[in-house]
Image (cartoon, rainbow, N blue to C red):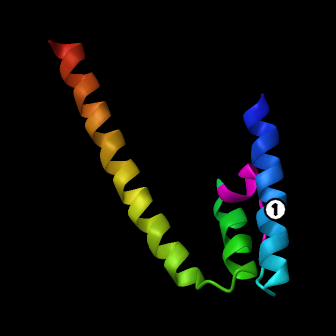
Amino acid sequence: MWYVLETEIRTQHYIKQMEERNLKVHTTDFEEIITLQGLKHLFKSLNFSEFLLEEKFEILNRKNSEKLRNENASKKRNFYE
């Protein structure tokens, strides 16, 4: 449990350092980064292009679709064997 407290202390330390340098700090939570809507909000708040986000999601969706097709094909082969 000590590592959670240490992580929180380090986070506050780095936030303070960034703010002293007039750098933008955005805190987020897990729910924000696991949904497309949450990621869009994060990208917008960091002034990142949503085009990059959409491109990355397209690649991830393609890889997931390929993985699912391969898993389903493997299950079908095992069923018939």
Residue pictured at 37% horizontal, 50% vertical:
65
Can see residue 27? no
Residues shaded magenta: 25-33
Residue 75 versus residue 34: which sits nearer the camera? 34
Q: Which residue is mark 1?
A: 13
The local secondary structure at tag 1 comes to helix
Tell me, yes or no, if residue 48 can be seen here. yes
Q: Residues within 10 Å of mark 1 (few under 14, many from 20)?
A: few
Classify the position of the C terminus by image quarter.
top left
The residue depicted at 70 percent of the width and 65 percent of the height is 37
Q: Residue furthest left?
A: 81
Q: Position of residue 60 (x, y in %)?
A: 43, 58
Report the number of discs: 1
Q: Give the quarter of the image for residue 29.
A: bottom right
**Nearer to the camera, 59 or 24:** 24
**Quarter-of-image position of residue 1:** top right
Q: Residue at the spot x=85%, y=70% of the render?
A: 16
| Position of residue 62 measured from the top left corner of the image (x, y, whole percent) | 36, 58
Which residue appears farthest toward the top when viewing the image? Answer: 81
Q: Residue at x 77, y 61 (%)?
A: 28
